[in-house]
């Protein structure tokens, strides 16, 4: 908790998402791809290699208390599904690859990742988060 200028307590929140960290080899490959693409897409803001990840669920602004509960509730699921196989497959861009504003690499993954996502959705629902309505599309953002 913190106190605002009027003396009232304010609950602190953070913008929260759940993600899989990338193995160093894949991170290096994506970094090399960025170096190749950089001269071709000059208006983009490039994601730093150390910040690359595979987002599983975006949760938005979440209180510190709820974040703690979420971490605690997800530990068994993460332990159960701690090994996933993820392969980078192809480059994607929006609105298209001719003049992209966003660049990403689409991924292929195994059933373990889908099971983890389902556990995340179930735990999130129990804590009051809405279930994702769109189907999961695995990708790693290179530039925005």
Image (cartoon, grey):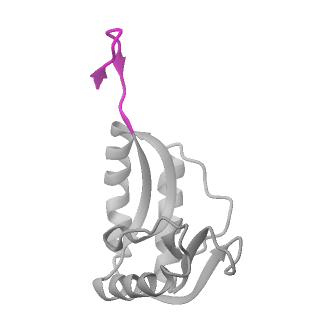
- Residue range in magenta is 1-13
Residue 140: percent from left, percent from top: 49, 75
Q: Is residue 66 left or right of residue 144?
A: left
Q: Is residue 53 left or right of residue 118?
A: left
> Which residue appears at 39% of the width and 41% of the height?
66
Residue 42: percent from left, percent from top: 53, 72
**Residue 132 to residue 85: above or below:** above
Instruction: Decide which of 75, 105 is in the foreground and name it.
Output: 105
In the picture, which quadrant includes the N terminus? top left
Q: Main secondary structure of the magenta part?
A: loop
Query: Residue 21, located in which quarter of the rendered image?
Result: bottom left
Quick check: is 40 in the magenta stretch?
no
**Residue 9 to residue 81: above or below:** above
Quick check: is 7 in the magenta stretch?
yes
**Residue 5 to residue 116: above or below:** above
Instruction: Decide which of 135, 54 is in the foreground and name it.
Output: 54
> Which residue appears at 37% of the width and 86% of the height?
26
Instruction: Decide which of 44, 144 is in the foreground and name it.
Output: 44
């Amino acid at each position: 908790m913190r106190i605002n200028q009027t003396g009232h307590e304010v609950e602190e929140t953070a913008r929260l998402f759940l993600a899989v960290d990338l193995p160093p080899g894949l991170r290096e490959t994506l970094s090399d791809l960025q170096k190749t693409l950089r001269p071709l897409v000059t208006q983009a803001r490039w994601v730093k290699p150390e910040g690359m990840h595979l987002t599983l669920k975006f949760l938005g602004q979440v209180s510190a208390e709820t974040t703690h509960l979420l971490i605690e509730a997800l530990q068994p699921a993460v332990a159960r599904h701690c090994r996933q196989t993820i392969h980078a497959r192809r480059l994607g861009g929006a609105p298209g690859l001719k003049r992209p504003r966003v660049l990403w690499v689409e991924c292929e993954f195994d059933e373990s990742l889908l099971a983890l996502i389902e556990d995340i959705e179930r735990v999130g629902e129990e804590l009051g988060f809405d279930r994702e309505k769109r189907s999961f599309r695995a990708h790693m953002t290179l530039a925005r």
